[in-house]
Image (spheres, grey):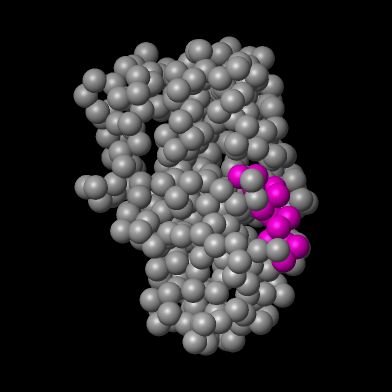
Amino acid sequence: MAAGLAACGSSSSSTTGSSSGGAVTLRVGYVTTPQHPYGIALASFKAAVEGASAGKIVVNTLPGASGGNDVTLLDDVAGGSIEMAAVSTAVWDSKGVQVFEPLQAPFLITNYPLDSTVLTGPIGQGMLADPNGPAKLGLVGLGLLEGGLRKPVGRDAALVSPATFKAKKLRAPASEIMTSSLKDLGAEPVAMPLPDVAPALKNGTIDGLEANYGLIVTQKFYENAKYVTANVNLWPFPAAIVMNKAAWDKLSSDQQKTLQTAAATLAKDEITNVFLNPPPDATNFVKVLCDAGMTFATATPDNLTALQSSVKPAIDGLAANPVTSGYLKQIQDAKAAQAPLPPPKPLPAGCKTS
């Protein structure tokens, strides 16, 4: 994965079907930096596709695409101005696609082994192929990747209990499920695209956000947000790799198969190589945050129970929705069947805790 970063480039001039010596060039956009797990995963996808096709398919990755706004990126790939994109599953419901909402069900997917099982197995693949999924927007779902488990991040105070969430203005993506969950926790969600978050933290427009370690580091949120709750995983933050259907239809069956094969195990490989067993030279996001002076807070068992209880309305809403209820139940069953997990790794020496 880390080695794949060297292959991560950008281009805005190539188009589907453009060729050099018979090669087809495809652009895939995403909203983060190349150093973020999204960028690392897509560098790996690029390498896999180009290797399997012997260079007959060229993938140009576009970090920070569509102004760093996932909703705009979804519009751009659906409209055909870009061939492919990795769009955070959180924002799809803002366009009427609810099939991915169970992935962001609060306090459901709270560890990476379960995340891998869901994203790469029949549950995630079912979401991608569902008529209520990407196809609803004229897109072909190829695969899923992971950005990292999201944690509460506080500007001036740790978010460790319903009382500490109360009336806090927290940035949220344009996501119905995440907005409703943050409201259940007592917060006031503030919809805001990614590029606007750091300035909002600096000037106090928001009191915090939900974010994974990679996002906190690559967007330098630690400069103005001083607390992250280490033992609270709210939800994962996957992205769906999709392709514009008209662009897809221009490809040969062999080219389509190459893309599908490269995307099929991407989430599993990424979670293993980025989150569970990173190479020695990979960026240690936790250590970076420790060195930056961020405080790692801990929620007590009682507060964890109270936080989980407070989001019951969001879970009940997913269970009552015929589009999402089946996937919710499948994830709940997978979690119930999961083997006991090892204890989390200790924080690096010298980390500030509270």
Total marks in image: 0
Q: Quadrant of residue 2?
A: bottom left
Q: Nearer the viewer, residue 334 or 289?
A: 289
- The structure residue drawn at horizontal position 49% and vertical position 35%, both measured from the top left corner, is 219
**192 sits left or right of 155 in the view:** right
Q: Let me know if residue 12 appears in the view.
A: yes
Asked if the magenta segment contains residue 168, the reply would be no
**Residue 227, above or below 88:** above
Residue 143 position (above or below residue 201):
below
Q: Is residue 71 magenta?
A: yes
**Residue 165 screen position, x and y as percent:** 59, 17
Q: Position of residue 302 (x, y in %)?
A: 47, 17
Residue located at (21% from left, 24% from top) = 349
Asked whether, in this view, residue 31 is left or right of residue 230, the answer is right
Q: Does any portion of residue 115 appear in the rendered image?
A: no
Q: Position of residue 18 (x, y in %)?
A: 60, 79
Q: Identify the main secondary structure in magenta.
A: helix
Per the rendered image, the range of residues in magenta is 68-80
Above or below: residue 37 compared with residue 108: below
Q: Position of residue 254 (x, y in %)?
A: 53, 86
Quarter of the C terminus within the rendering: top left
Q: Residue at x 40, y 68 (%)?
A: 47
User: In this view of the protein, which residue sits in the foreground, 114 or 58?
Assistant: 58
Compared to residue 83, the image places residue 192 above or below, namely above
Q: Residue at x 49, y 20 (%)?
A: 224
The picture quadrant where one finds residue 240 is bottom right
| Quadrant the N terminus occupies | bottom left
